[in-house]
Image (cartoon, rainbow, N blue to C red):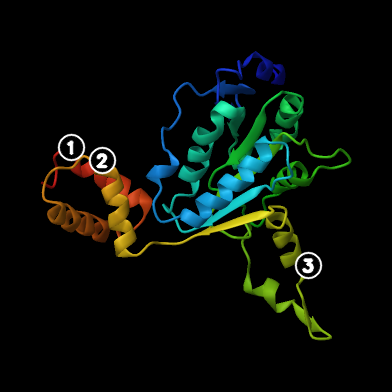
Amino acid sequence: MDLNQHNLIDWQNTYAAIWRPRRDYLRPVRQLDAVTLSHLVGIETQKQQMLANTERFITGLPANNALLWGARGTGKSSLVKAVLNEFKERHLRLIEVEKYDLVALPEIVDQIRELPYYFIIFCDDLSFDAADNSYKALKSALEGSIEAPPKNVLVYATSNRRHLLPESMADNLESRMVEGELHYADAIEEKISLSDRFGLWLSFYSVDQDTYLAMVDEYFKQFSGDRSQLHLEAKRFALSKGSRSGRTAKQFYNFFSRGEGK
């Protein structure tokens, strides 16, 4: 198969696709993750900024590529999926590309730049090793090369790293002060230059206990038992996981709603 396989997708009825490098084609997603914005508790500011940016995008106004970075399980990927569900009836579409497949990004973008839809290129859990040069394809997609980037394509990426690339102590030792201004070492400049291409940075942090329990309550809206006991079990579950987050709340729901732990 070749990249013209993209054109076989019925984007009118297909809201998302996943790039499959071994077969060189986009596989249509038949069943979307049903997460909605109301499911996401404790990240109101991040939701508002993502909604505003995406609203601008699908109405033809200037909008930014977005980097959602921070602690694991805090709703970064879920927020991107929820944004798709919010705007999919308004011609928003999503293409998921693994970081190892970013070399194909220019060809993917070539196939969609003239289509009458707005595409989010979604890179989940994005980070690069020190010797990994595949990020250069992403840099080109973010800002274009000799050709301007298409107005109907944005990149939304999630990462545990703010600058996507690892930073070492040696890099920082080469930075220096010049006339009162900090000048980063060349190695740091190269690493920061990638994340700088994302105009919207959203940070995500681990939540406190009250927010975690609010997340649990969102999943257990129909629960008719002893809610104080439910909260106690939820706290025990988070302690066993060593983490309080939206992901932990969902895992607790999957565990407890089967009748276990009651």
Label 1 sits on residue: 258
Q: Position of residue 51 (x, y in %)?
A: 56, 45
* Tag count: 3
Is the Cβ of the residue at disc 1 closer than 8 Å to that at disc 2?
yes
Element at label 3: helix
Label 3 sits on residue: 186
Of tags 1 and 3, which is closer to the observer?
A: 1
Instruction: Pick whichever, 229 or 20, lies toward us.
Output: 229
Q: Position of residue 143 (x, y in %)?
A: 78, 46
Which residue is rendered at x = 81% and y = 42% of the image?
Answer: 144
Label 2 sits on residue: 254
Element at label 2: helix
The alpha-carbon separation of the residues under discs 3 and 2 comes to 47 Å
The alpha-carbon separation of the residues under discs 1 and 2 comes to 7 Å
Is the Cβ of the residue at disc 3 closer than 8 Å to that at disc 2?
no
Q: What quarter of the picture does the N terminus occupy?
A: top right
Instruction: Pick whichever, 14 or 243, lies toward us.
Output: 14
Which residue is rendered at x = 22% and y = 54% of the image?
Answer: 234
